[in-house]
Image (spheres, rainbow, N blue to C red):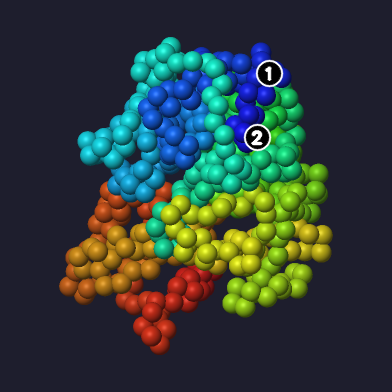
Amino acid sequence: MSMMQEILTKRAEKTPHLEALVGGTTRYTFKQYNERVNQMAHYLMSLGVQKGNMVGILCKNNHPVPTIMMAAIKIGAVPVPFSWQLTAFELEDLLQTAKPTVLFYDEEFADHVKNAKENQIVPHMIQAEKGFHTTEAYEQIFAEHSMEEPSVSLTGEETAFMLFTSGTTGNAKGCMITHDGLDAYFKEAAKRPVKEGGRFLAVHPLFHMSGILNLFNSITSGITIIFEIDSTPKTIWDTIEREGIHMMLGFPSVYTYMLEELKERGGKPETFKYAAAGGTKVPASLIYEYEKQGIFMMEGYGSTEAWVVSAWRHDMGESKADSVGKAVPGVQIKIADPDTGETLPQGEVGEIMVKSPYVFKGYWNNEEATEQVFTDGWFHMGDAGKLDSDGFLYIMGRYKDVIVRGGDNVYPIQLEEIIQHMDGVLEVAVIGIPDDFWGEIPRAYVVKDANSSLTEKDVIANLQSRVADYKVPQVEFVRELPKNTLGKIVKRELKDLVLGALQ
């Protein structure tokens, strides 16, 4: 058996009565958690789920997510958490790609999965929750199946779970994370300041890599996870105070709003000491503001494919707060010329490349895309960066044609394809522009036919019906777009023009 199959069993044996999961009024110890995972595992096997089969999850943050995930891992199946932010159109495309044997979903996503259910894209579909409460059908699983440990043999190279991301082509790609990769990470690099018996607030989406890492870390470290469905600043602080939370993870934008609320409250709850951030760079000014309140922020840099690459903690020094820290144990970082691949001298800006035991094994059914992101065992992060003399990594921008809006990736080609098909559109280019709050936001520059009556509102309305809200860009009509001698739009020139105008 792999380590990941056994971690919950071993934790339940070590601290059976320690609280493990809290969601609303529902509370489970590690013993109860493990028992429910075993029951879910036997249920999945009764549906015909076998080693290597996909198990889809479209649920908000609550105890069903880790229960389903760990059950799938125990029997060698592959949990696939889907983003809540997807439209029905986008979700169906991913379901067609992953072909899960079973999909668990919340009531609020019933319309999203309606077509998939009618067309029998997924053989088995179970509504797990209604609001913050589990359904009768979901709870019936635990009344009918055995608590005995399932016995399934796995090799370390097999896929433990899969997360969807997209490349610059905009096509959805499933990142396959291996059992060996997870084993190595939790043996070598998973270090948290909160120890056994600590309490962690999970408001960060559990379809994000960093959110999932904390689910696993709670088991390996013996930490209680508290789920909160209402993530307004007031509710978060109320929950932190009520539950005695020691640490949480969130996007920098979440902490910005929380800071305003904290100042109005006049001080932090006594137990709360650590605020971890991920998804996008944390402004050094925000780190300083939280330290004034007696809260230490930390941040990590990585990707769905590479997992955690580097981390910064307050004990590394405020003078390095504008970096993303040092490489975590086991990870090698080099800065390379994006054109030649040659390693650049210290302090020069180039493409960030990593070699790591935690890097994914490839994209699901897409060998060509996998080969494109590796060179001699080094993974191309697609980001521009530099290393200083102390080994701290600084992110300078991106080489990939991807926009990171508050931690969520926005892929221009997806938006461009939709806009390009609208009547009256001649050309379109989507780029990211700086934003003080989100870090970066998408903006579409559209060239339309002189006789077209198309408006910015028309373009936005069309996009809102096809993509998640966070992807919808600002829209600006222009007379022409910069091109090279072959007639190809040169986005770098467009961005330079836009940034120059903004400055």
Whether residue 139 is visible: no
Left or right placement of residue 213 versus residue 470 in this view:
right
- Rendering coords of residue 237 (x, y %): 59, 27
Determine the residue positioned at 59% across, 41% down.
155
Give the image location of residue 90, x and y in percent: 34, 48
Residue 375 visible, this orientation: yes
Inspect the image, locate mark 2, and give the three-letter code of the amino acid beneath it: Met
Give coordinates of residue 21: x percent, y percent: 57, 21
Q: Which element is circle 2 on?
A: helix
Q: Is residue 425 above or below residue 275?
A: below
The residue drawn where x is 49% and y is 15% is 146
Quadrant where the image shows the N terminus: top right
Give x and y (percent) for residue 466. 30, 50
| 1 or 2: tag closer to the N-terminus | 2
Mark linked to residue 13: 1
Residue under label 2, please give it: 3
Q: CA separation, marks 1 and 2?
A: 15 Å
Q: Residue at 40% of width from left, 87% of height from top? A: 485
Q: Quadrant of residue 474?
A: bottom left
